[in-house]
Image (cartoon, rainbow, N blue to C red):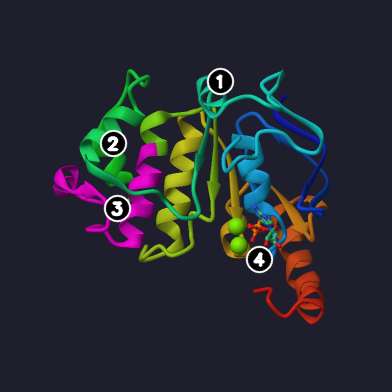
Amino acid sequence: EPILIVNDVRLTIDNKPILKGVNLIVEKGEIHSILGPNGAGKSTLASLIMGINGLKSPTEGEIIFKDTLINGKEIFERARLGLTLAWQEPARFEGITVEEYLKISGRNNPDLDVEECLELVGLDKSYLFRYVDDTLSGGERKRVELASVLAMKPDLAILDEPDSGIDFASMEDIAKMIRTMKERGTTVLMITHREEIAEISDRATLMCDGKVVQTGDPKAVGEKFKTMCVKCEVKNPQLV
Ligand code: ADP
Ligand code: MG
Ligand code: MG
């Protein structure tokens, strides 16, 4: 049963085609990775699904979340429907403590346990009294952001490169946290450009140059990514 359907989505910005007919189905309950090199359009697709960065509607195509067409909907409407996005570059909130931030995030979660959310991302409870601003390192802010997703317990969490810029000791920490989200009923759409991370997912989709190349078994998609991106790199030296 699909929770998210992206149907032939195209996006053109300033006459430049960024997404060129993306098709993607995320099944309820799965961990689904989107793999792809830098510049493939992964974050743009995530922004369109969440309706952020001024991207409320694709130029063409449909985005359907839980049987509702969400093209044009405001961020808060999408959030109310059960959709959340953890940013590639987490925001700062001056004057707000981690505890306040997690309580705000989890205000509709009757089972909220803020200490446990922190623990699951590898932060001890002394972080509750820290501020969500520049006094946290980039990696710490990223962990707090992921803790806020655990606090919210959304139906679908889009995680944009949860592995990037993070000082996690090992991939296992991220993997464990994502599995916990799944166990608690959250479907996870995880964007990454590391195929080791994609391997913890149930299915994966490879994006390149604004298009979906393949969806299927994460190992097979990871292999395709490795071979294809060698070609991409020759075409475009900015790629990873
Ligand atoms: P990825 O997340 O896969 O690395 P992005 O979605 O960030 O890729 O970017 C895809 C392409 O779209 C890049 O070429 C980027 O420069 C371009 N792009 C993204 N946002 C904008 C924008 N607001 N205006 C113009 N070009 C953009
Ligand atoms: Mg990128
Ligand atoms: Mg990106």
From the top left corner, tell me how far across and down residue 166 is, in percent: 40, 62
Q: Residues within 10 Å of mark 4 (few under 14, many from 20)?
A: some
The amino acid marked with disc number 3 is Gly
| Picture quarter with ligand 3 | bottom right
- Answer with left or right where residue 114 lies relative to residue 25: left
Determine if the C-beta at disc 4 is less than 8 A from ligand 2. Answer: yes
Helix, strand or loop at mark 2: helix
Q: What residue did someone put label 3 on?
A: 122
Of the pair 48 and 158, the residue shown nearer to us: 48
Separation (CA) of disc 3 from disc 1: 29 Å
The amino acid marked with disc number 4 is Asn
Helix, strand or loop at mark 4: loop
The amino acid marked with disc number 1 is Leu
Q: Please say whether residue 6 is visible from this viewpoint.
A: yes
Q: Find the magenta span and give its range.
A: 122-148
Separation (CA) of disc 2 from disc 1: 20 Å
Of badges 4 and 3, the one in the foreground is 4
Q: Which mark is residue 38?
A: 4
Q: Residues within 10 Å of mark 3 (few under 14, many from 20)?
A: some
- Answer with left or right where residue 208 lies relative to residue 54: right
Task: Residue at 48%, 59% (x, y): give it.
Answer: 163
Q: What residue did someone put label 1 on?
A: 81
The amino acid marked with disc number 2 is Tyr
Task: Say which label, 4 or 3, has the lower sequence index.
Answer: 4
- Answer with left or right where residue 26 lies relative to residue 123: right
From the top left corner, tell me how far across and down residue 219 is, in percent: 71, 59
The total number of labels drawn is 4
Separation (CA) of disc 4 from disc 3: 28 Å
